[in-house]
Amino acid sequence: ALSAGRRKNFIHLFKTCHTGPLFVELANMGKGLIKLAEGGALVAVIGDEDTVTGFLLAGVGQIDPKNKKAANFLVVDNKTTQAQVEDAFKKFLAREDVAILLINQHIANDIRYLIDQHTAPIPSILEIPSKDNPYDPTKDSVMNRAKGFFGQKS
């Protein structure tokens, strides 16, 4: 169970409900607040075909008509190389309009070293299960860091 102070900090970190334009503010380890662009922020997805299709049907997808390569998703199949996954991951992290990066955990395992190097609060990286690969919280880098933040051992 969380102490009252930790619960208050946890709730503060995850409050994002506002009227009007979306502003996401997260504490940056005592270094101030980060504000995303007034126009809102995107969710990027790196996953297998079923996962990406589900998120696209939910309205997550964005393609710039002027630059077809600026999509906010990557479908990973048996023809996708690790270099392509790494490039997409780095590209999504570098984009200022991406606030959350969802990635199937079995794909994240292939680029774990890159995920472990990412320490910025935005974009947040969330590892998610896929239809064929269940989620294992012991492999999730972000979950392990969060446990350390709340004083739990991994």
Image (spheres, rainbow, N blue to C red):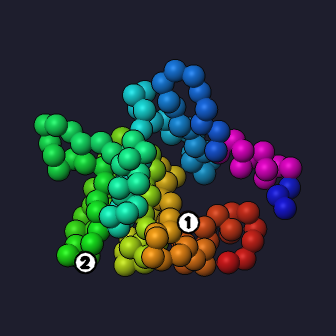
Q: Is residue 152 left or right of residue 17?
A: right
* Type of amino acid at the residue the image marks with label 1: Val
Residue at horizontal 86 percent and vertical 55 percent from the top? 3
User: Which of the pair 128/84 is nearer the observer?
Assistant: 128
Q: Can I make out residue 108 in this image?
A: yes
Q: Bin the neighbour count of mark 1 within 10 Å (Cα to Cα): few under 14, some 14-19, many 20 and up.
A: some
Residue 75 position by quadrant: bottom left
* Secondary element type, mark 1: helix
Residue 33 lies, with reference to residue 95, above or below; the image says: above
Q: Is 64 part of what is drawn in magenta? A: no
Residue at horizontal 57 percent and vertical 48 percent from the top? 28
Q: Position of residue 56 (x, y in %)?
A: 36, 49
Residue at horizontal 51 percent and vertical 31 percent from the top? 23
Q: Which residues are magenta?
A: 4-13
Figure quadrant of the C terminus: bottom right
Figure quadrant of the N terminus: bottom right
Q: Bin the neighbour count of mark 2 within 10 Å (Cα to Cα): few under 14, some 14-19, many 20 and up.
A: few
Q: Can I make out residue 98 in this image?
A: no
Residue 33 lies, with reference to residue 88, above or below; the image says: above
Determine which residue is flagged by label 2. 78
Determine which residue is flagged by label 1. 142
User: Which of the pair 129/99 is nearer the observer?
Assistant: 129
Q: Sequence order check: which comes first, mark 1 or mark 2?
A: 2
* Secondary element type, mark 2: loop
* Type of amino acid at the residue the image marks with label 2: Asn
Q: Position of residue 19 (x, y in %)?
A: 57, 22
Badge count:
2
What secondary structure is the magenta-colored segment mainly? helix
Residue at horizontal 64 percent and vertical 44 percent from the top? 14
Q: Position of residue 8 (x, y in %)?
A: 78, 45
